[in-house]
């Protein structure tokens, strides 16, 4: 029996292309990093638990990024003064509404639909022009010209309508193929002919 030599040969270095492929596959398998959201309850609990700790130590023990924890510490008064649901993810979810008269516009949209009138971005724009001319003037201020401002307003109103559940109505359930109408018409005229001639 031979004794194994104590010296092991180092493994071959992988080629540059193999290293590149491994790096690419690692990036693909890692996937997209999603932003974490923390509830107010979690923020308050972490702030209480990390009171008196250094920033690094607190971040390590709680498993929260240092910058996030630093921001929470800066706005600790706002977090503890918040009067609302503990499940809320932030103080003001979503972005601020660009249309300051949103409730009035929704009421107009509902009234228009209730009266069985067509609700379009143009009718909404005419409502804004008639009722809120000051806001319309301020909205036009930063635009290149009036055509661009008008298109921008229409796009804003379409997005507003979609965001609030108003979608374009199409009477798709009422649409019938012409061939089926012709067939029904033929059957009706056959029976009408029979009734008139007294065959039935």
Image: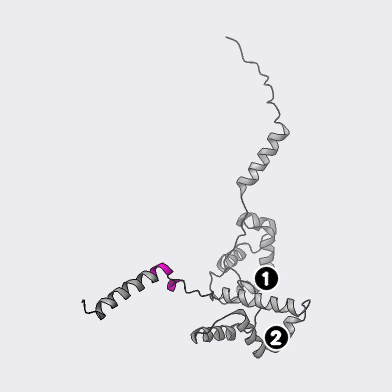
Residue holding disc 1: 75
> As displayed, is residue 17 above or below residue 129?
above
Asked where in the image residue 34 lies, by quadrant, the reply is bottom right
Visible residue check, residue 173: yes
Q: Secondary structure at mark 2?
A: helix
Instruction: Identify the image quadrant of residue 152.
Output: bottom right
Q: Which residues are magenta?
A: 171-180
Q: How packed is label 1: few (under 14 Cα within 10 Å), some, or many (20 or more)?
A: few
Q: What x and y, as percent, mark residue 6?
A: 66, 18
Mark 1 vs mark 2: which is more N-terminal? 1
User: Which x, y percent locates residue 175?
Assistant: 44, 72
**The label number, if any, that marks residue 135 in the structure image:** 2
Q: Residue at x 31, y 72 (%)?
A: 187
Left or right of 114, for residue 6: right
Q: Residue at x 61, y 79 (%)?
A: 121
Q: Is residue 97 magenta?
A: no
Measured Cα–Cα span from mark 1 to mark 2: 33 Å
């Amino acid at each position: 029996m031979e004794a194994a030599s104590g010296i092991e040969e180092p493994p071959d270095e992988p080629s540059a292309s193999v290293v590149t492929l491994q790096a690419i596959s690692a990036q693909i398998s890692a996937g997209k990093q999603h932003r974490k959201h923390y509830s107010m309850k979690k923020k308050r609990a972490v702030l209480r638990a990390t009171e008196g700790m250094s920033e690094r130590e607190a971040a390590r023990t709680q498993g929260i990024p240092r910058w996030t924890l630093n921001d929470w510490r800066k706005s600790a008064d706002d977090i503890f003064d918040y009067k609302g649901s503990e499940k809320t993810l932030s103080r003001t979810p979503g972005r601020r509404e660009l249309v300051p008269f949103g409730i009035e516009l929704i009421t107009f949209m509902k009234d228009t639909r209730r009266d069985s009138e067509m609700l379009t971005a143009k009718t909404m724009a005419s409502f804004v022009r008639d009722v809120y001319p000051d806001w319309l003037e301020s909205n036009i201020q930063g635009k290149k010209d009036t055509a661009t401002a008008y298109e921008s307003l229409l796009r804003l109103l379409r997005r507003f309508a979609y965001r609030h559940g108003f979608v374009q109505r199409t009477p798709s359930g009422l649409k019938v193929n012409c061939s089926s109408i012709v067939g029904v018409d033929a059957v009706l005229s056959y029976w009408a002919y029979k009734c008139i001639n007294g065959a039935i």
